[in-house]
Amino acid sequence: MPGEQLRGALVHLSDLSGLEIRDCEISGLRVVDCYGSDVYLGGDFGRLVVNDVDVTAYVESELDRRHPLRVLARDVSTPTEHRAAWEAIESMWETTLARARRLPASALHERVRGEWSFVETQRHLLFAADAWVGNAVLEEDAPYHPLGYPAGGTPPEVCAALGLTLDARPTLEEVLQARRARMASVRRLVDGLTEAELDRVCTRKPADPYPDGEYVVRRCLRVVLKEEVEHHRYAVRDLAVLEG
């Protein structure tokens, strides 16, 4: 129900089987005295309590165990650590892209359980780097590639203003051509990083939807690293389904 406001609402004695909540702010959400055999939660939760047990630390530690690059991307501090993290990300995607190419091209456009397709994921990572590096850090004249794919819920007029063509259906290789160029610009940036550059305040924000505020280079790079690692996690999860 896009656009409808349910803040503070009470849903009582209702059959919500199959209900899907996507791209929503759910701080303070409480699900009480409910029952079901298959419940899935996915997102960025500051604190998660299940049946009065705080499972936040367990979930984070298990994700870190399964995806060690999460720790590297989250804890980067020095220029050397940024270079190591980006090198690991490049290697990670090289392996996963080889795996994806073994699937039929049509499968790479398939959405698994409503999540972004593999091609859409690559388009989103292109947009993230365009916004946080190309625009905010490098201050390029034309930082946004038309094939970039922003976060869900981005207003159409914002996408149009950025020159994005969301309804395009490019091949994986067409997206990767643009993505490789942006990844190369990130590589050049991290190769030349200094402590002073990491602490430099950017004069631009990533894009108009983002709030006004202070954007420091290290913050922008951390967002890009986190995006790469987390969306790789989603991508390999869905590749396993497509392969099966």
Image: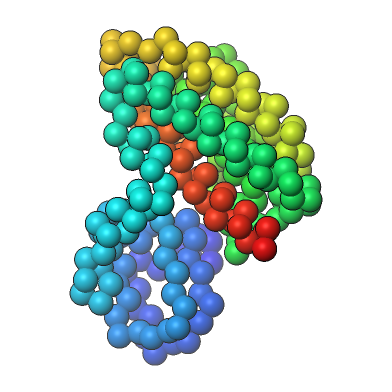
Is residue 145 visible in this depiction of the protein? no
Q: Residue at x 60, y 38 (%)?
A: 95
Q: Position of residue 10 (x, y in %)?
A: 34, 78
Residue 28 quadrant: bottom left
Q: How many numbered marks are there?
A: 0
Q: Position of residue 189 (x, y in %)?
A: 46, 15
- Residue at the outermost bottom position: 13
Q: Taking 54 as reference, is 105 left or right?
A: right
Q: Residue at x 46, y 40 (%)?
A: 229
Between 115 and 173, which is closer to the camera in this rendering? 173
Which quadrant would the C terminus be assigned to in this image? bottom right
Residue 174 quadrant: top right
Q: Position of residue 163 (x, y in %)?
A: 65, 30
Q: Taking 243 as reference, is 214 left or right?
A: left
Q: Is residue 50 above or below residue 85?
A: below
Q: Taking 59 as reference, is 4 left or right?
A: right
Q: Position of residue 164 (x, y in %)?
A: 65, 34
Is residue 110 visible in this depiction of the protein? yes
Q: Residue at x 57, y 49 (%)?
A: 235
